Amino acid sequence: MCGISGFLNRDPAQPADRDLVVRMTEVIAHRGPDGSGLHVDGPVALGHRRLSIIDLSTAGAQPMTNEDGTVWITFNGEIYNFLDLRAELEARGHAFRSHCDTEVLVHGYEEWGEALPERLCGMFAFAIWDARRRRLFLARDRLGKKPLYYHLGD
């Protein structure tokens, strides 16, 4: 069970509160003893605590990005059909650097956009930062097996 955290400043001209996300990620350290990560890009910060399950190498570290650094994800869960999705994405020209289900989500978002969750079988919660569109996309599994909490405030 991993842990994810994040922050999006509603004013895109203002930077994300990096220290807040570091503290949020430290509080959930018990959810991921195998590593932690942080990505900050302007108004957004994504944090992650890792519990390695599928790909034990550092290639599975999060937050994870695509090849050009325009799509970032922090993810908790397990995608049961990730091998089928990976094969489909590879057939469409996507290249993978890891063996984990997280990277399938990154390339799946590139291919299917916000329709990605409809293609997923599993339990999951994730946040994807689309740096090109300057948009944060949140999703969780249909049954809420992996909860996703957010606060919208000033």
Image: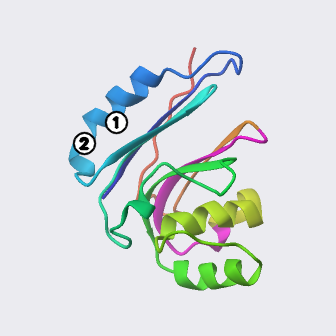
- Give the answer, above or below, for where 143 lies relative to 26: below
Q: Nearer the viewer, residue 47 or 94?
A: 94
Circle 1 residue: 25
Amino acid type, label 2: Ala
Looking at the rendered structure, the kind of residue marked 1 is: Thr
Residue at 68% from the left image edge and 17% from the top image edge: 11
The quarter in which the C terminus is drawn is top right
Q: CA distance from mark 2 to mark 1?
A: 6 Å
Q: Are marks 2 and 1 in contact (CB under 8 Å)?
A: yes
The secondary element bearing badge 1 is classed as helix
User: How far across and down, in percent of the image, does residue 8 sit?
Assistant: 58, 28
Q: Is residue 87 above or below residue 65?
A: below
Residue 63 appears in the picture as rendered: yes
Please tell me whether residue 35 belongs to the stretch shown in magenta: no
In screen coordinates, is 17 left or right of 34?
A: right
Residue for point 59% across, 64% down: 105
Q: Name which residue lies at 60% across and 48% down.
A: 72
Task: Give left or right: position of 125 versus 109.
Answer: left
Residue 54 pos. (x, y %): 37, 73
Closer to the camera, 138 or 75?
75
74 sits left or right of 53 in the view: right
Kindly indicate the quadrant of the structure image that contains residue 89: bottom right
- Residue 29 got which mark? 2
Relative image position of residue 143 (x, y in whole percent): 48, 63
Instruction: Give the crowd class for mark 1: few <14, some 14-19, many >=20 residues within 10 Å.
Output: many
Local crowd at mark 2 within 10 Å, few (<14), some, or many (≥20)?
many
Tell me the colour scheme of the image: rainbow
Instruction: Describe the element under mark 2 as helix, strand or loop.
Output: helix
Image: magenta residue range: 118-133
Q: Residue at x 73, y 84 (%)?
A: 91
The dot on residue 108 is none
Figure check: 51 above or below 91: above
